[in-house]
Amino acid sequence: MNAVAARRADGALTLLLINRKDEAIPLPLHVEGASSLRVDVYRFDDEHRAELVETAQLDLPAMIEAPARSMTLWVMQEP
């Protein structure tokens, strides 16, 4: 499991999760100073080719998941 986070010039926080394992990995997510974020989730795996798979409002702290054998990009902004 690898994870990389960065803040974009527009203020969005990005989180890239790379899971090479054959099982999903649950992860806690806490963002200092934030209680809720708007998220766009993009996935690259056997079924998705870097596609937007979810847009949601996420209350923090939260549990998120890195699906098996996937790369998932979370783009998060304060509402």
Image (spheres, rainbow, N blue to C red):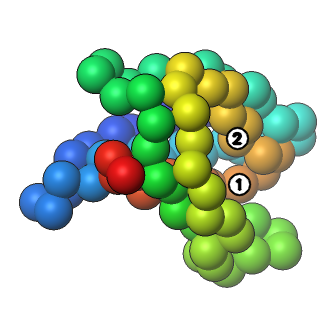
Question: Looking at the picture, does residue 73 appear above or below residue 34?
Answer: below
Give, as a three-letter code, the residue at label 2: Ala
- Taking depth in this image into account, of 68 and 41 the one nearest to the observer is 41
Vertical relation: 1 (above or below) 28: below
Q: Is residue 79 left or right of residue 71?
A: left
The picture places residue 57, in percent across and down from the top left corner, at 57, 50
Tell me where residue 11 appears, x and y as whole percent: 18, 53
- Please, is residue 64 above or below residue 69 in the view? above
Q: Is residue 63 left or right of residue 18?
A: right
Q: Is residue 41 visible?
A: no
Q: Residues within 10 Å of mark 2 (few under 14, many from 20)?
A: many
> Quarter holding the N terminus?
top right
Which dot marks residue 66?
2
The quarter of the picture where residue 26 lies is top right
Q: Residue at x 75, y 66 (%)?
A: 45
Q: Residue furthest right?
A: 23
Q: Position of residue 38 (x, y in %)?
A: 47, 53
**60 relative to 10, above or below:** above
Task: Label 2: state its secondary structure.
Answer: strand
**Residue lying at 68% horizontally and 26% vertically, measured from the top left:** 63
Hey, what amino acid is under mark 1? Ser
Where residue 66 sits in the image (x, y, percent)?
70, 41
Which residue was labeled with disc 1? 70
Q: Do tag 2 and tag 1 residues touch (Cβ < 8 Å)?
A: yes
Name the residue located 88 percent from the left edge and 36 percent from the top edge: 23
